[in-house]
Image (cartoon, rainbow, N blue to C red):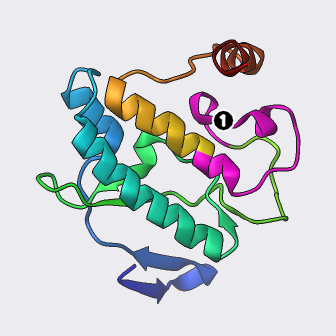
């Protein structure tokens, strides 16, 4: 964040740096055929560092997906995690319905307590999608999603 400005009516304006495309946009450029394992590895390292940092702050992002990871520059592999609108503090979950379905962790679908591990689940699903161009689990409902996870992982 570059700066904040207080506006009338109690509003606050946040000014951020200009970013490039999302990782989902990058997948669309490849006609959903995926990117190289070398590039996935570069993205994964940065995303894992971001998740390590958010965990150290006691924050769960709750919406890790390709649309929420932006390239810093269109011709570089540096990325930043965005959209903390669903984020919560560890142990203080405000919402039972979090994460986009294709990236939703089983414990969330089962209505269980969740922690930072749900972000890791989403990141793993996203890495698979970045490599293959296709989501790992494509359930058309939450129940179907759980069935697909169980069929694959047991």
Residue drawn at the location 23% of the way across and 54% of the way down: 20
Q: Residue 153, how many percent across, how many down?
A: 67, 21
Q: Residue 36, how many percent across, how many down?
A: 22, 35
Q: Which residues are magenta?
A: 99-120
Query: Looking at the rendering, in which quadrant would you find the N terminus?
Result: bottom left
Tell how many labels. 1
| 114 versus 121 height, above or below | below
The quadrant in which residue 80 appears is: bottom left
Residue drawn at the location 66% of the way across and 14% of the way down: 148
Read off the residue under disc 1: 104
The quadrant in which residue 4 appears is: bottom left
Residue drawn at the location 19% of the way across and 30% of the way down: 29
SS for callout 1: loop
In the picture as drawn, the residue positioned furthest to the front comes out as 154
| 40 versus 72 height, above or below | above
Left or right: residue 92 versus residue 13 is right
Is residue 152 within the magenta segment? no
| 53 versus 121 height, above or below | below
Q: Residue 104, how many percent across, how many down?
A: 66, 35
Left or right: residue 57 versus residue 18 is right
Left or right: residue 108 versus residue 46 is right
Rate crowding at label 1 as few (under 14), some (14 to 19) or many (20 or more) other CA atoms within 10 Å. many
The quadrant in which residue 40 appears is: top left
Q: Residue 31, how many percent across, how many down?
A: 23, 20
Residue drawn at the location 69% of the way across and 37% of the way down: 105
Q: Nearer the viewer, residue 108 or 141?
A: 108
Query: Looking at the rendering, in which quadrant would you find the C terminus?
Result: top right
């Amino acid at each position: 964040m570059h700066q904040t400005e207080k506006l009338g009516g109690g509003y606050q304006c946040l000014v951020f740096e200009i970013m490039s495309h999302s990782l989902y946009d990058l997948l669309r450029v490849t006609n959903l055929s995926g990117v190289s394992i070398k590039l996935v590895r570069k993205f994964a390292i940065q995303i894992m560092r971001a998740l390590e940092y958010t965990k150290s702050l006691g924050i769960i992002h709750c919406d890790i997906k390709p649309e929420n990871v932006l390239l810093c520059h269109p011709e570089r592999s540096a990325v930043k995690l965005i959209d903390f609108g669903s984020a919560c503090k560890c142990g203080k979950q405000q919402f039972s319905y979090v994460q986009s379905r294709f990236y939703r962790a089983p414990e969330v679908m089962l209505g269980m307590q969740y922690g930072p591990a749900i972000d890791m689940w989403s990141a793993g699903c996203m890495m698979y999608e970045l490599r293959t161009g296709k989501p790992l689990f494509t359930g058309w409902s939450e129940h179907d999603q759980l069935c697909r996870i169980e069929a694959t992982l047991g």
